[in-house]
Image: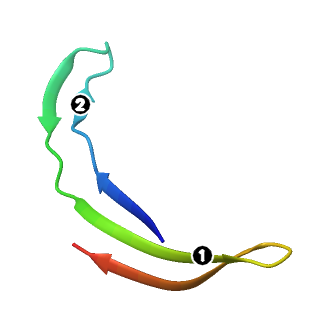
Amino acid sequence: MVDVDFDSPAAYVVDAQGTRVDERTAELSLRLRVRLEHSDHWRIVATELNP
């Protein structure tokens, strides 16, 4: 099993001169669990997504 925790980082909004004018905070956080098997190549045999 492979567990992956994914949190989207903050994103900065800049104007044409590169000045930061806004910041968007993370709205995405999830955990993905994947079961892999190997037989000549890796194969995903099960997934589970928990927001």
| Residue at the spot of label 1 | 36
Q: Is residue 38 above or below residue 11?
A: below
The label nearer to you, 2 versus 1, is: 1
Where, by quadrant of the figure, is residue 32 drawn?
A: bottom left
Say which amino acid is labelled 2: Tyr
Please state which of residues 41 and 15 is positioned toward the viewer in this rendering.
Answer: 41
What x and y, as percent, mark residue 17? Answer: 31, 13
Colour setting: rainbow
Say which amino acid is labelled 1: Leu
What x and y, as percent, mark residue 20? Answer: 20, 20
Residue beneath the point at 22% across and 59% down: 29
In the picture, measured across the screen, residue 28 lies left or right of residue 36, that is: left
Where, by quadrant of the figure, is residue 40 drawn?
A: bottom right
| Residue at the spot of label 2 | 12
Label 2 – label 1 distance at C-alpha: 36 Å
Q: Is residue 32 above or below residue 43?
A: above
In the picture, measured across the screen, residue 18 lies left or right of residue 46, that is: left
